[in-house]
Amino acid sequence: MLARQGTRRVLYLDFLAPSLLRRDASSSVIPNPRPPPPHPRQDRATHPIQKHPNNSQHLASQTAQLSFVKTGSEGPLPPTNGIDLFVKTVTRLDATLGRNNLSGVRELWVTLASRKLLEYLGIPQLQRYSRSIASMYGCTPGSGDQWSAKDRWTMQTIAIYTALCGHPEAIHAVMLHHLTTNEPDEVLRLYQTYTTSHPENETPQQAKPTEAVPIPDNLAPSEERIGVLLGAIAACAMKGSFSDAVRMVVESHTRIVYRTAEHHIHTFPNAPAVETYVRRLEFVFLLSHPPAFFRHVDHLVQDRAAEELGRLCKDIIVGTLGEEPWLAATEQQKSNERPVVIPRFTWATLITALTRCKRQDLAGRLWEDMIKCGVKPDASIWTAVFDGYSALGAWQESLAAWDAILTQDVEPEPLTYRAIIATLFKARRPDDAMTKFKEYEQNWVGKGKQRSAKLADGYLSQTLSLHNTVLHGLLTNPDREAQALALFERMKTDGPTPDLISWNTIMANYGRRGNMKMISSTLQGLKESGLTPDVFTYSTILTALLKAGREDAPQLILNMMKKDNINPGAAVNTTIIDHLLREPDAKNIKAAFNILNRMEGEGTPAERPNEVTYTTMLTGIYRWGSSKEAEAYRLDILRRMGKRSIHFNRATCHILIRASLGSPSREGPHYALYHFNQMIQLKIEPDFDTWYIILGGMLHRGEIRMAKDLVEEMTRRGFEPTGALCPLIRRLRRERW
C-alpha cells in the first residue's frame, strides 16, 4: 500500500445508526470533530490561566497529569481551566470502560461532550475506546441483544465519534453485529443516517431516525469511505435489492474496486452475494462517471490489454442478454431488476478501443451483440468505428464502412466526417479526404437556414474540430499549404471562427519550416483575435528558435511569456520540457536541461522543479535510447533529485517503469527494475497496476527470466493476482528463456 504521509486520519468502516443520535438531556455527545488549533498557545490566549496561590506549580502539576493520558505530540492541550476536569474524566472513563460499566461510561462521555473536551482526546484514547467497544460487541454472538437501549446508544455513540476520528474498529463491530443478526434494514438506516443528517442537542426520545452526523472532509476523505458503502451494499445483497445498491454507488461518487475491497468483503456473513454485487457495481460506477470509464478503457488500450477489454465486453453482454440480466441496453428495458441503462458512449468507446488493440474480431462480435441487445447504431457509434480505423490507418475499410452507413439511413455528423477525413489524410490520400470534406459542405452547410440553425446550436464544436482536422491534414501532406491557408482565411470570414488550436496548427507549420517571420506574424494575429497563447504556442516557437541555432531560445521564450503576463510556473516549464523531449535530439535535450537549471537556480518558489518535472526529464531520456550521454543524463537527474530530497511517488514510478520498458535502449528492463526497487525502498507496496505494467512490459520485450523472477517476488510479498494478471502469469509460465 502506498505509504501515508503526514498525520492524515483514515476512516475505513464508519457506519452510523439512527439510535446513535440519541443523547442525554441537553448534551451533544457526537460533536463534529474539528481540526486542532494551529498551536496550543492560542488556547492559552483564549482561556487565560486562572489565579492560583502557586500558579506555576499548579500548571506543572496539571501538565504532568495530562501527560499520563495524552502524549505531547497528540495535538492541542485543553484550556488551562479544563485540564483538571479533562484528566479526571478521561482517567475514570478508561477505568469504567474496562469494567464494562456502560451507565458510568455514558455519564462520563456526556461530561466530556458538554464541556467541549472531546476534541482534545488523543490518538491513544480514541483507539483504545474504539477497540473496547469492538471487543464488547464481538465477545459472544448476539452479545448486543443483552444491552438496554441506553447501553447500545452509549456504545454506538462512542463508535461513531472514534470512527469519525479515524479509528473504525468499533464501527466494524456494530456493522457486523447487524449483518450477522440478519438486520439489513437496520444497516440501511445506519447508512442513511450517516449520509444525510447532523446531530442536534436532543434527548434520546427526541432523536429523529433520519438525522446523521456529517463526516468532516479532513477526517474522512472520499477514498476512505469504501467501508461504509460496502456495509450498505452487504445489506442490499441480504435483501436482494440491487437497485438500492446502484443508487447508493451513484450518489456516493465512490468507486469500489473488487481487488482492493476483497478483504472487506470476506468479513461479511453473506460474502458470495456481496462479491457478486461489488463486481457489478464497479462497472456501474464507471458507467455513471464517463471520465472514469474513458480513463479505464484508455489504460487498457495503452497496455494492449485486449483480453481484459474482451472480458469487459462479455460482462456487458451477459448482464444484458444472460439468464439473470441486470443491465438495460435501452431506456425501454429499464426496470427494478435491470436498473442500469448502458449509455450509448459505452458501445462506441469499446468498439474504438478493441480496434485500436487490433482486435477487429472482438469489435465485430461486440457490434453483433449490440444489435441483438436492441441498440441501433447511430452516427456516434459509426464515428467510433471510423476512429478505430483511423488509429490503424485502415482507409479501405473506412471507405467500405462509409458506404454501409449511407445504406442504413444514418446521417453522418461533422465528427463522423472528421474521423474518415483524418483516416484518409493519414493514409496520404488528400484528394479523397478533400472530396469527403466537399461532401460535408454540400450536405451540412448548403442545406439552407434550418441546417444552419441546427449547426449553430448543437454542432459548432464538431464543425470546428472538423475544420482543424482538415487544416492539420493539408499541412502534413505535401504541396497542400495553399489550400490550408485558403481554408484558414475562409474560416476567419465565414466561420467557424478559428480557435487556439487552429492558430497553433498554422504556427506549427511555419515552425517546421523555420519561417520565423511568419511565426511572428501568426502570433500577432492570434493575439489580435482576442486569444491568449498557450504552452503549445510557446513550445512551437521555442522549437523553431532552437532549429534556427538560437541557444538563448529558452530564455527568450520565458521573457515572452512574462511580457504576456503568463506565469511560467513549474507546470508550464515541465510541459515545455516534455514538448522538447518529444523530439529528443541533442539541441532539444540541451534546451530542456537549460530550463531545468533555471528552475533549480534562478526560478521563483512556484517554478521549483518537482517529482513530475524530473519524471518528465527521465521519460524523455529513456525515449532517446542507448548512449553514454543518455546514461550520464540519467544519473545526473537522479543526483539532482537526491540533492533536493525529492522522491518519486506511485504514479511517477509507474510512468518511469512503462517508459523504461518502452525505451529502445538495451538497458530499458534494468531501468524498470531500478524504479521497481525504488518503490520498495520508499515503502510503496506494488499494487495491481505495478505488477501488470512491469510483467506485461517484460513479456513484450522477451525478458522472460526477469519476468519470472518478478512473479516469484510477487508470491513472496503475498500479492494475490486477479483479473488480467492471471492470464499474463499463465502465459509467462508457458514461456522459456
Image (cartoon, rainbow, N blue to C red):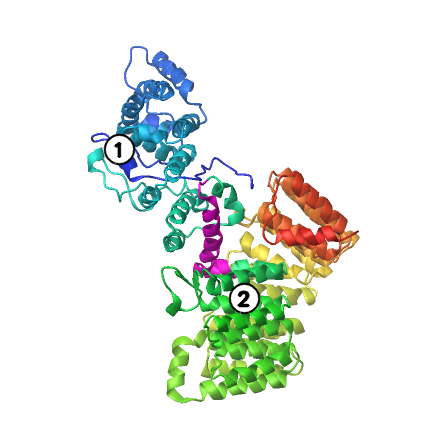
Q: Relative to residue 94, is residue 620 depicted above or below?
A: below
- On screen, residue 480 versus residue 566, left or right, reads right
Query: What amino acid is at disc 1?
Result: Ser
Q: Position of residue 515 (x, y in %)?
A: 64, 74
The local crowd at label 2, few if under 14, some if 14 to 19, many if 20 or more residues have their Cα within 10 Å, is: many
Closest to the observer, 55 or 111: 111
* Relative to 723, residue 71 above or below: above
Q: Is residue 159 left or right of residue 294?
A: left
- Pinpoint residue 623: horizontal percent, then vertical percent: 70, 58
Picture quadrant where residue 204 is located:
top left
Say above or below: 427 vs 48.
Answer: below
Please indicate whether residue 297 sits to the left or right of residue 180 in the image: right
Determine the secondary structure under disc 2: helix
Label 1 residue SS? loop
Task: Find out whether residue 230 is within the magenta segment.
Answer: no
Does the image show residue 617? Answer: no
Residue 394, image quadrant: bottom right
Name the quadrant containing residue 110. top left
Q: Which residue type does callout 2 highlight?
A: Leu
Q: Residue at x 38, y 32 (%)?
A: 162
Residue 137 in the image, given as x and y percentages of width and height: 38, 30
Residue 246 visible in the current orientation: yes
In the rendered image, which residue does mark 1 sit on? 28
Boundaries of the magenta span? 268-294
